[in-house]
Image: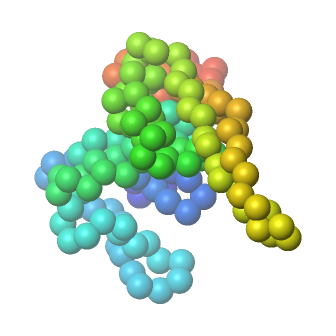
Amino acid sequence: MEKIGRNMIYCDTDSVIYSIPNGQVNPIEYGELLGEWTNELSGDDYINKWLATGPKSYHFQTRDGKKVTKVKGFTLHHKNSQVINAETMERLIDGDIHSVAVQDFQIICDKTTRQLTSRTDKPKTLRFNFDKRVIIDNYDTVPYGYRSL
């Protein structure tokens, strides 16, 4: 993380998303061994759109058109992905909407009787959940209590 510095966009337990400014060299060397950095994208593809509404809740799109949306605690099957997607995440971040709710429907098979039953879960709500730092101009952040010298 020290090598990446202010170019870090997002980090989690086992991943880091960062930018490489034009004209600069990637500060990270990739490897194949356990504990070494790997690039999850293929070839020279790169992320050109990144949205995060909180820890383990993000969407990205690559130059080659790959789109990935992950939200912890939500199953993003077809119906839910019509509600939780890049557009709604961007609207949450911009403050245009405050939350979005989805409801899961499940078909469950009882292991002993082999009887099928259906269940509708309580609605789950996604919000923009950013409370680790203070957001300033252009979505940059500073730690709580930070004062410019």
Q: Is residue 109 above or below residue 125?
A: below
Tell me where residue 122 appears, x and y as whole percent.
71, 33
- The answer, for residue 19, to whether it is visible in the render is no
Q: Is residue 148 above or below residue 110?
A: above
- The answer, for residue 36, to whether it is visible in the render is yes
Residue visible at 47% across and 77% down?
Answer: 36
Q: Which quadrant of the figure has residue 132?
A: top right
Tell me where residue 2 appears, x and y as whole percent.
47, 55
Q: Which quadrant of the figure has residue 7?
A: top left
Left or right side of 80 for 130 = right
Q: Which quadrant of the figure has residue 96?
A: top left
Q: Is residue 35 above or below residue 101?
A: below
- Identify the residue at the far top of this view: 96
Residue visible at 47% across and 49% down?
Answer: 77
Left or right side of 136 for 45 = left
Left or right side of 108 for 149 = left
- Identify the residue at the far bottom of this view: 33
Q: Is residue 22 above or below residue 32?
A: above
Q: Nearer the viewer, residue 80 or 24?
A: 80
Residue visible at 37% across and 52% down?
Answer: 68
Q: Nearer the viewer, residue 106 or 64?
A: 106
Residue visible at 52% across and 24% down?
Answer: 100
Tell me where residue 27 appears, x and y as whole percent.
33, 62
Tell me where residue 31 appears, x and y as whole percent.
39, 81
Left or right side of 99 for 25 = left
Q: Nearer the viewer, residue 87 or 146?
A: 87
